[in-house]
Image (spheres, rainbow, N blue to C red):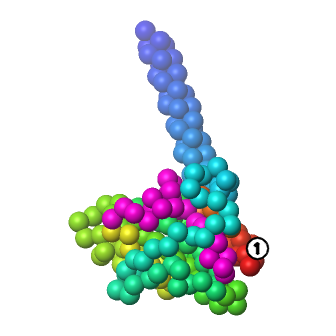
């Protein structure tokens, strides 16, 4: 009887070890996937209402600093129009790249970043405070318009965030990228704009 109990105990230990290894492998694989900057460019011709080369739908939103920002007033500059929220893991991954691009390359390329926060989706009682804490923690210095109610996201048919539109200096949409961008990808997209 002792031999059976010992044998059963050994089998149980082996099962636990194998199960633990399997779970560890699954967690590591999942983390590796989430670490990848998975993004893809939307074919604008397949998005009803948005077409490559069309004038970007205009909007005015108040920024985190309290100033109004009107998209059409940025005509003459290349615009990186980004939609994000503080609870979004890929957005968190992307923000340092946007900030670094803004600090190091945007001025030289005559580019601006307009990072629209989907404030109405923030998961706290004080959404503005949450956004401010996020901006402070990432030391963001580009304009953060606040979308306190649905509207602009519908104009741009935002289904997934982060979502970024590359708008040329004539105010026309040239690219729509879904997913996080790194600094190199941002640079490449901006260089492709007129």
Where residue 64 appears, as percent x and y from the top left, is 37, 81
Q: Quadrant of the N terminus?
A: top left
Q: Position of residue 21 (x, y in %)?
A: 57, 38
Q: Is residue 157 magenta?
A: yes
Residue 83 position in % (x across, y down): 50, 66
Farthest left residue in view: 125
Q: Residue at x 74, y 79 (%)?
A: 194
Prevailing SS of the magenta stretch: loop
Is residue 56 magenta-colored?
Answer: no
Residue at 57% of width from left, 70% of height from top? 56
Q: Nearer the viewer, residue 70 or 16?
A: 70
Q: Please indicate whether residue 173 sits to the left or right of residue 148 in the image.
A: right
* Magenta-drawn segment: 149-173
Image location (x, y in percent) of residue 43: 68, 54
Pick the residue in front: 152 or 12: 152
Find residue 61 and report its image quarter. bottom left
Front residue of 33 and 68: 68
Q: Secondary structure at mark 1?
A: loop
Where is 184 relative to 42, above or below? below
Rendered view: 48 above or below 26 = below
């Amino acid at each position: 009887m002792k031999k059976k109990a010992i044998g059963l105990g050994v089998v149980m230990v082996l099962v636990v070890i194998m199960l633990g290894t399997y779970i560890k492998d699954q967690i590591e694989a999942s983390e590796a996937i989430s670490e990848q900057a998975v993004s893809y460019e939307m074919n604008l011709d397949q998005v009803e209402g948005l077409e490559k080369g069309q004038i970007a739908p205009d909007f005015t939103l108040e920024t985190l600093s309290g100033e109004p920002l009107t998209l059409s007033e940025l005509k003459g500059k290349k615009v990186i129009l980004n939609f994000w929220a503080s609870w979004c893991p890929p957005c968190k991954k992307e923000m340092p790249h946007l900030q670094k691009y803004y600090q190091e390359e945007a001025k030289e390329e005559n580019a601006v970043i307009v990072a629209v926060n989907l404030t109405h989706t923030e998961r706290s009682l004080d959404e503005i405070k949450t956004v401010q804490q996020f901006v402070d923690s990432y030391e963001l210095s580009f304009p953060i318009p606040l979308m306190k109610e649905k509207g602009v996201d519908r104009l741009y048919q935002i289904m997934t965030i982060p979502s970024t539109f590359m708008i040329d200096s004539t105010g026309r949409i040239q690219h729509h990228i879904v997913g996080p961008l790194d600094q190199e990808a941002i640079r490449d997209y901006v260089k492709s704009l007129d």
